[in-house]
Image (tube, rainbow, N blue to C red):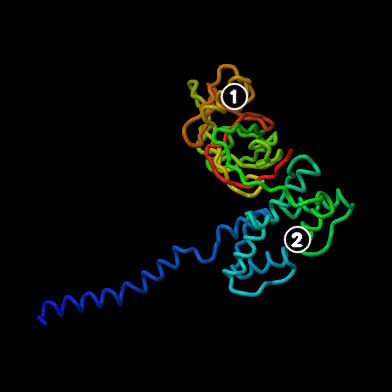
Amino acid sequence: MSQTLKKLISTLLLTALIFTPFMQLTHVQAAGIIPLSKLGRVEELLYGSVSEKPILERVAVIEKTVYNSTQSGSIVQRSNKIISDLLITDEKSTSLLFLLNTVEWSITGELGTGNLIDRLNNLEEQVSGQRADGPLKTRIKNLYELTIKGQDLPVKKVESMNDQLIRIKLLAKINSGTARKGEKVPYQVMEDIKVQDTLIIPRGTKGELEITKIEEAGKMGKDGDIKIGFPSLEAIDGTKLTVAIQKEAQQENESQKLAIGASVLGTALLGLPGVVAGYFVEGKDEEIPAGSTFYIQVTENKELYGVEVK
């Protein structure tokens, strides 16, 4: 074997020894073994905020809430069980979120405010006059049995309709003089959204718009400028749907004289591709009052599960 070939083989072997562990580590990291983003979503759903505590402690706290005891297995296994039980609806099982959403909608006609625990407490008090004891999983299933169970829950797989209109109401005001870029503003869905005979977004569903650009009104008639984006809206089964103000929503807003602001005369509501909408008023700070109503629309076709209502 020539010296050149020996050197080449040695170089290749050394490279493999150096980079193989790195490649394995990179693969493990990319795989996202511990689903931290979904774990955070569970915490927001249950408690209203994401914990900054160590992962093991976070998992144990959630388990205590949902099951009343810590579960066996690795952090990965325990996290995936929590996520599956709370968030995942498929042909074989219905998530606790889906179940609670359905019970609440069937009793009150809309989804309530607050985190999932607060909503469950309120429903139990409405139904029986007091909050129940025990783990959250058992309480939700018992409430379902007590209220609407007579047959299996009529869960149906459907596809969201691109351009389907959704009427919403702002729950807080926006003012170009005080608002800040990145600020989240809550809104509420005003009517049930269905695909044929299947409910996919109940009335009362909460979402948030995000301020993507804000400019105060200036001297010499400079316009106040607010631009807002719409992060995804959650369906009854927890599926995230992309929404925006685009052509169909803009036309509906204009035809019904609905706009994001106190006055609709002499204004321009812009539905740009993506998620951005703008509202302009000449020479003064613009305020979009709480209670303002307007249309947004679904901007994707996506499979999800809803409740068949006939």
Q: Secondary structure at mark 1?
A: helix
Report the quarter where the C terminus lies: top right
Q: Secondary structure at mark 2?
A: helix
What residue does disc 2 label?
A: 136
Residue 19 as seen in the image, left or right of residue 268: left
Residue 51: % across, % down: 62, 61
Residue 224: % across, % down: 53, 27
Q: Is residue 118 above or below residue 160?
A: below
Q: Which mark is residue 6?
A: none
Write down the quadrant of residue 74 in the picture.
bottom right
Q: Residue at x 67, y 57 (%)?
A: 93
Name the residue furthest right: 129
Neighbour tally class for label 2: few under 14, some 14-19, many 20 plus, Cα within 10 Å: many
What residue does disc 1 label?
A: 252
Name the residue furthest front: 151
> What amino acid is at disc 1?
Glu
Q: Is residue 265 above or below residue 49?
A: above
Residue 7: % across, % down: 16, 78
Disc 1/disc 2 C-alpha distance (Å): 42 Å
Neighbour tally class for label 1: few under 14, some 14-19, many 20 plus, Cα within 10 Å: some
> What amino acid is at disc 2?
Leu
Residue 231: % across, % down: 55, 42
